[in-house]
Image: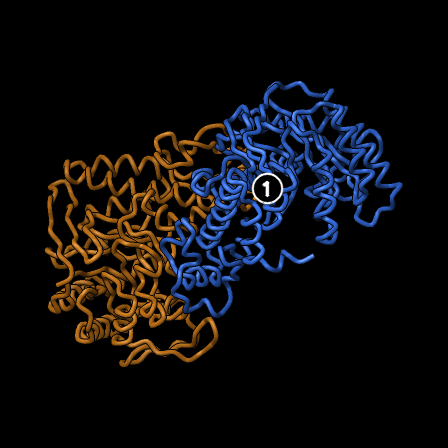
Chain colours: A blue, B orange
């Protein structure tokens, strides 16, 4: 077993803390993984990721398999060495990207045939292939290949995909060859309680070292997301890490921890940074707004990042208006510092049985994301 | 006097070292100033500039006067505070950019009328205005406004512009109001020894705290550049810093130091970094070349920068092909580390009366720039 998950404190007020031991280091959970799609968190060399407080990063199998190719990364010493990130790395299975990015997709029991969005080449992703690619990359946690369906799919289609996802997870488990890569299954089931529960229970029988909840953030209403994500967590194995994929806003993170999730990834802090939407203790600031052209205040006086300690909003506005890559670097460093600092506050709140008051604070700072 | 220049060692083998004291710190010369056109060296927050070894940066008056405006920067505490660079800053006068970037330019004795390339607004740059803008910015060294002529201008046109440059330098001197900003004059004179000498001598009589040689890198042959730049230096005041504007390649820098220059700026390391042309101890490497897609070697095993210590050429190639801003950051950090490390080697070589052997080493590493 390449992964050890040791719960430390299960709070009666919601949430739990734990220690996750991986081949590339020990991580405190709940943990947020910045997204380094193409073996890089854009504009953030690893020394800046560490400065922001990152302990764990996520990369995308689909993008890396297309370019530069997983065997090339393997031959260069694996993904950790390639991108010079010494801590743990998790990769998705590529299933979501095939679903959202590939052309002429055709799914059957064997796997997913599609055309490369790079050069149109015919490609095939099977459960076995997804595992082989991720083992080539040498990551700490690999995700099983799942079948996604559109948000408008009918009950029977969702049911069939959910059942196939379980069968594929078994094939992924049986295809494993590498000791240091732990396989997580992905609970699907659309917005059906019955299917979510069935998926969680069937996958649980595979006794994988961890599980994720997938299929959220696909356009569902916030109230539905909350209900289904919380319900799903309650049926995922207790003693293993629970990973909520692709979520979310600061408020989402606090709430999801209260439902029992331990791991998160989301493009929000990094993508928003590039768009000039900056997270602060008082909510999101759109740095491009004209009001900031003469704004001598720091972005967030409570933030320890370099930008907040050294430059004004006016300077960040100036960089953004010039499309200066220094702005991208500083904005991303800031947003990740915010997110990773928030995770530290969440862990502290769980330890102190005080998650509800942190939730209330965030609901006030981020009223837009608090709505149903 | 806001500037003190103290020569330390004048080498019989060529070159001199000195200590330049500015209101924002003491700098060892010969010194290279990275170019931070719009109050930012692209992709390099000041903490990375320092890591690369920068002690002095250059910014462009013209760009900053257009956006965000010099009075706005003044009101925000000045350029050092605005861009959070604590060390000395030099700005050009804006004359070169008006010459190269502005539309509908019209020059007379008063100054230069032109239209803003940003919004077409009618603007006017005079010697007095150039000084006022730079004093608003609060820089350590301001450059006097000079009149540039095209490389194909006739002798009489060059002569008139050179004489006007001297008259404008006197007006700049008389327009000074701020104690902490030292004014440098710019020696012009095209490719005429007679005019270069006249310009250097006439400007020398103004007793400014330092002088630059301008009007190079405008398409002249390398042999002509060498001859004229060396000749010009020999007629610039001995006891004051000599700044060769906009130069140059690694070999240019060593040679220019041997002619007596102390200060340099050039976009080469930063612009080339963005284009993937990386300076190494064995010459320039084009990181996008297909040969590097599988190249597990470090960019330069002799370089102390983060990229050279931690990632392969294959990874830098991958970042470049993806147009990933992390690549821009790492490439720029590397090229500046190379340039600023080279300046340290140049200073050491001068101290040890060994500049010729360093020149020979660079001529071998950079044969393309050694030609006549």
What residue is at 14 percent from the left and 48 percent from the top? B18
Tell me where residue B248 appears, x and y as whole percent.
32, 50
Instruction: Spot the residue most to the front.
Output: A12
- Which residue bears the numbered disc 1? A13
Q: Residues within 10 Å of mark 1 (few under 14, many from 20)?
A: some
Question: Which residue is pictured at 29% across the width and 62% down the height?
Answer: B91
Q: Is residue B293 left or right of residue A240?
A: left
Query: Based on the displayed image, in which of its 4 quarters is residue B166 positioned?
Result: bottom left
Q: In which quadrant of the rendered image does the N terminus of chain A lie?
A: top right
User: Percent position (x, y) of residue A316?
Assistant: 44, 59
- Where B248 sits versus A182, above or below? below
Whether A92 is drawn above or below B169: the answer is above
In front here: A183 or A28?
A28
Mark yes or no: residue A43 visible: no
Q: Chain of mark 1?
A: A
Relative to the observer, which residue lies in front, A87 or A60? A87
Could you tell me residue B370's position as x and y percent? 32, 42
Residue A197: image location, x then y, percent = 78, 35
SS at circle 1: loop
Q: Nearer the viewer, residue B365 or B178?
A: B178
Point 84% across, 33% down: residue: A108
């Amino acid at each position: 077993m390449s992964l050890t998950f040791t719960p430390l404190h299960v709070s009666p007020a919601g949430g739990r803390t734990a220690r996750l031991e991986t081949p590339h280091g020990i991580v405190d959970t709940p943990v947020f993984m910045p997204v380094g799609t193409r073996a890089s968190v854009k504009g953030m060399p690893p020394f800046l990721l560490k400065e922001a407080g990152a302990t764990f990063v996520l990369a995308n199998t689909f993008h890396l398999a297309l370019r530069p190719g997983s065997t090339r990364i393997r031959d260069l010493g694996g993904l950790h060495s390639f991108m010079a990130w010494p801590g743990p790395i998790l990769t998705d299975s590529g299933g979501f990207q095939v679903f959202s990015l590939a052309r002429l997709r055709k799914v059957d029991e064997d796997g997913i045939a599609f055309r490369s969005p790079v050069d149109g080449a015919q490609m095939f992703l099977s459960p076995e292939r997804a595992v082989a690619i991720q083992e080539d990359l040498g990551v700490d946690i690999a995700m099983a290949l799942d079948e996604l369906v559109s948000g408008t799919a009918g009950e029977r289609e969702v049911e069939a995909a959910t059942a196939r996802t379980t069968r594929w997870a078994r094939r992924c488990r049986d295809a494993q060859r590498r000791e240091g890569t732990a396989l997580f299954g992905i609970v699907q089931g659309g917005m059906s309680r019955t299917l979510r529960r069935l998926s969680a229970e069937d996958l649980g029988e595979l006794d994988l070292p961890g599980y994720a909840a997938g299929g959220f953030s696909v356009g569902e209403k916030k109230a539905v997301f909350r209900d289904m994500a919380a319900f799903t967590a309650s049926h995922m194995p207790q003693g293993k890490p629970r990973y909520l994929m692709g979520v979310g806003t600061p408020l989402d993170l606090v709430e999801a921890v209260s439902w029992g999730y331990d791991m998160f990834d989301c493009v929000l802090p990094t993508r928003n940074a590039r768009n000039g939407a900056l997270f602060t203790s008082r909510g999101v600031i759109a740095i491009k707004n004209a009001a900031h052209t003469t704004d001598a205040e720091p972005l967030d006086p409570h933030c320890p990042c370099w930008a907040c300690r050294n430059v004004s909003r006016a300077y960040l506005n100036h960089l953004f208006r010039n499309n200066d890559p220094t702005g991208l670097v500083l904005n991303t460093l800031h947003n990740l510092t915010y997110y990773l600092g928030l995770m530290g506050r969440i862990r502290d709140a769980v330890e102190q049985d005080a998650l509800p008051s942190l939730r209330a604070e965030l609901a006030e700072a981020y009223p837009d994301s608090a709505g149903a």
